[in-house]
Image (cartoon, rainbow, N blue to C red):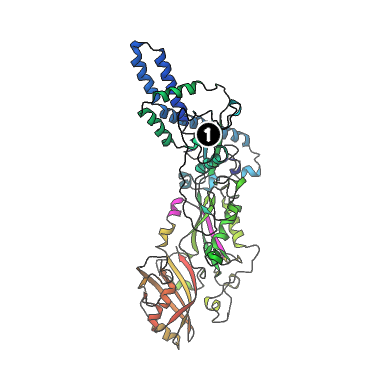
């Protein structure tokens, strides 16, 4: 345990979860307990007189039926001893690292007790989990010249145990080359030990408790006295050497914790998560876009904020790690979750200057898109200072101080030349949180509870989204007054949207009711205008503009009475 906990800063520096340590001992130990019960029964019968043989027979039967209780008691005993030993280790390590002359490494404890909320402590966010696995040493060593003989199990001639031939059910996790999070550190420890020390997946020592119980119950039901006598003879005849005939293995992992924040995205070639499509030769997966929001945030948080994510609890340990090629299932990971998503060609910006007039009265602050990073099995938990450093590294504030410009959507569409760049340096409102050349910036990074994370998607349905569009119309519009008159609908307006044609292949067909809360337009020339609107969550803005072949009613196209299309779309803030 001490060795496995080193990467996490040691046992003393971290709280241990209430359920830890959990313990796993081989279920086939019940076979030895059953054999010992048979031997005890025989000894009682042999030493009893005819007058009280029934009494001893009853006692022996009771002993034979207690092999499952012995297994449960042995497991609980080992767990109790392990719990006391870990508590002793924590006290001893605390004494060693105590005092006023703590080193820099000791001051930066992996678990910042004073920086997490009571709710996080209540859900044991970032606590260490511990699991102990006891396995037999299969090799007979000096006990036999035949290395294939397992002297810890009865031979097949005494009791046919068989082997565990259950096939593990494989879940389909997609065919893109990104790693997927899954598995359990306790199960993965057993798999690694099985493959290395216990004869692979089909070894008899790998059998489940229910399988062993079924075999022994069958012996009882068949009243197989000969089998019981053979088991008794086998257990009595074993070498009574005190040599250790088992090995101990430990898994230590950090339970998940959550870091929340907001992000902006100032490029149209950056997706929210890695985006792969089967466009390569033979249908191979090809990545689209320069990068993704997830790839800009999660690696920095994992490396700088958390001191890397552990690989020791994957199904393949770090020594035999194959996850570098991608597409594997790993336990430790920094997972990215966002409150909704924007298309790869849509920017996620802060509201432009003067946008407050377009807000609804009940709206509060309008900012970037909320997100939560679920950090699983991190080496340490980030302090508030670490999260500040993570924010600065993502935003590149020291490297690209002058790269704050965000062009107006009409300029970005190439319809008009910029009269004045929109940047923080010329007094305009900043449209992004930082100046990362890959377009992704973050703000407000802090801890949050798992309940906040679980409500992330639910809260999405209640948020108001602000958008800016560069719109083309087929018929010429002569003046701003004409544009206002033709778009002169009373807001908020209820719209009915059938599932868009562009997503109909992956989403169920249906009609959804949404609301456009505010609407304003600025004419650029006879065929182009900038449209700014706010909508309820889940509105398909592109389809609201061009009508989607009449599947969205009403639409900008139906209001103007001509064909319209959208060239650029920006999300200009989400109301909190």
Place of residue 223 in the rendered image (x, y in percent of width and height, measured from the top left): 36, 26
Q: Residues within 10 Å of mark 1 (few under 14, many from 20)?
A: some
Residue 503 at x, y percent in the picture: 43, 68
Query: On screen, 33 above or below 540?
Result: above
Going by the picture, which residue comes out furthest to the front?
A: 157
Depth order, front residue of 314/456: 314
Q: Can residue 362 be seen from the camera position used here?
A: yes
In this picture, residue 478 sits left or right of residue 178: left
At mark 1, the secondary structure is strand
Q: Quadrant of the N terminus?
A: top right
**Residue 400 at x, y percent in the picture:** 64, 66
The quadrant where residue 218 appears: top left
Above or below — where is 437 with respect to 32? Answer: below
Q: Quadrant of the C terminus?
A: bottom left
Residue 111, x across and y down, in percent: 56, 45
**Vertical order, 548 against 118 (above or below):** below
Is 447 part of what is drawn in magenta?
yes
Q: How many marks?
A: 1
Judging by the rendered image, the residue that carries numbered circle 1 is 134
Q: Quadrant of residue 192?
A: top right
Assess whether residue 545 is covered by the magenta stretch: no
Of 120 and 269, nearer the camera is: 269
One can see residue 127 in this view? no
What residue lies at 43% left-to-right and 19% top-to-bottom? 40
Magenta-highlighted residues: 440-455
The one nearer the camera, 314 or 386, is 314
User: Looking at the image, is 321 positioned above or below residue 77?
Assistant: below
């Amino acid at each position: 345990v001490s060795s496995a906990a080193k990467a996490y800063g040691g046992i003393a520096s971290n709280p241990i979860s209430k359920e830890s340590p959990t313990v796993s001992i081989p279920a086939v130990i019940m076979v030895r307990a059953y054999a010992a019960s048979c031997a005890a029964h025989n000894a009682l019968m042999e030493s009893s007189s005819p007058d009280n043989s029934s009494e001893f027979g009853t006692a022996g039967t009771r002993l034979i039926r207690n092999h499952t209780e012995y297994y449960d008691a042995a497991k609980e005993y080992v767990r109790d001893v392990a719990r006391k030993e870990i508590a002793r280790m924590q006290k001893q390590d605390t004494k060693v690292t105590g005092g006023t002359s703590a080193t820099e490494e000791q001051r930066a404890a992996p678990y910042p007790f004073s920086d997490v909320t009571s709710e996080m402590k209540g859900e044991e966010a970032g606590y260490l989990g511990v699991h102990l696995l006891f396995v037999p040493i299969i090799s007979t060593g000096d006990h036999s010249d035949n290395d294939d003989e397992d002297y810890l199990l009865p031979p097949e001639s005494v009791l046919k145990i068989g082997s565990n031939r259950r096939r593990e059910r494989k879940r389909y996790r997609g065919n893109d080359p990104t790693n997927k999070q899954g598995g359990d550190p306790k199960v993965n420890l057993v798999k690694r030990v099985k493959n290395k020390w216990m004869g692979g997946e089909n070894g008899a020592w790998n059998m489940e408790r229910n399988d062993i119980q079924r075999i022994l119950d069958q012996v009882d039901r068949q009243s197989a006295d000969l089998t019981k006598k053979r088991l008794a003879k086998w257990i009595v005849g074993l070498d009574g050497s005190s040599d250790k005939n088992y090995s101990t293995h430990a898994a230590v992992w950090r339970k998940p914790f959550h870091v929340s924040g907001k992000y902006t995205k100032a490029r149209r070639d950056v997706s929210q998560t890695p985006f792969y499509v089967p466009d390569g030769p033979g249908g191979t997966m090809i990545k689209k876009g320069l990068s993704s929001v997830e790839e800009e945030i999660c690696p920095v948080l994992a490396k700088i904020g958390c001191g890397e994510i552990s690989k020791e609890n994957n199904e393949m340990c770090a020594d035999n790690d194959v996850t570098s090629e991608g597409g594997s299932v790993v336990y430790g990971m920094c997972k990215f979750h966002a409150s909704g998503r924007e298309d790869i060609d849509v920017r996620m910006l802060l509201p432009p200057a003067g946008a407050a007039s377009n807000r609804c009265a009940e709206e509060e602050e309008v900012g970037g898109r909320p997100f939560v990073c679920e950090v699983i099995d991190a080496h340490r938990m980030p302090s508030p200072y670490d999260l500040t450093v993570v924010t600065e590294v993502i935003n590149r504030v020291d490297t690209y101080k002058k790269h704050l410009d965000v062009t107006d959507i009409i300029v970005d569409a190439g319809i008009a030349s910029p009269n004045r760049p929109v940047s923080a340096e010329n007094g305009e409102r900043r449209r992004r949180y930082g100046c990362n050349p890959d377009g992704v910036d973050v703000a407000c990074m802090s801890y949050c509870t798992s309940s906040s994370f679980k409500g992330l998607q639910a809260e999405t349905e209640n948020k108001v989204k602000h958008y800016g569009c560069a719109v083309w119309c087929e018929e010429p519009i002569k003046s701003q007054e004409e544009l206002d008159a033709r778009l002169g609908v009373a807001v908020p307006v209820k719209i009915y949207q059938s599932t868009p044609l562009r997503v109909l292949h992956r989403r169920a067909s249906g009609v959804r009711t949404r609301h456009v809360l505010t609407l304003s337009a600025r004419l650029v020339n006879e065929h182009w205008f900038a449209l700014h609107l706010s909508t309820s969550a889940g509105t398909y803005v592109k389809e609201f503009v061009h009508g989607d072949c009449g599947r969205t009613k009403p639409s900008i196209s139906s209001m103007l009475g001509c064909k319209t299309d959208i060239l650029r779309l920006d999300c200009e803030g989400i109301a909190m």
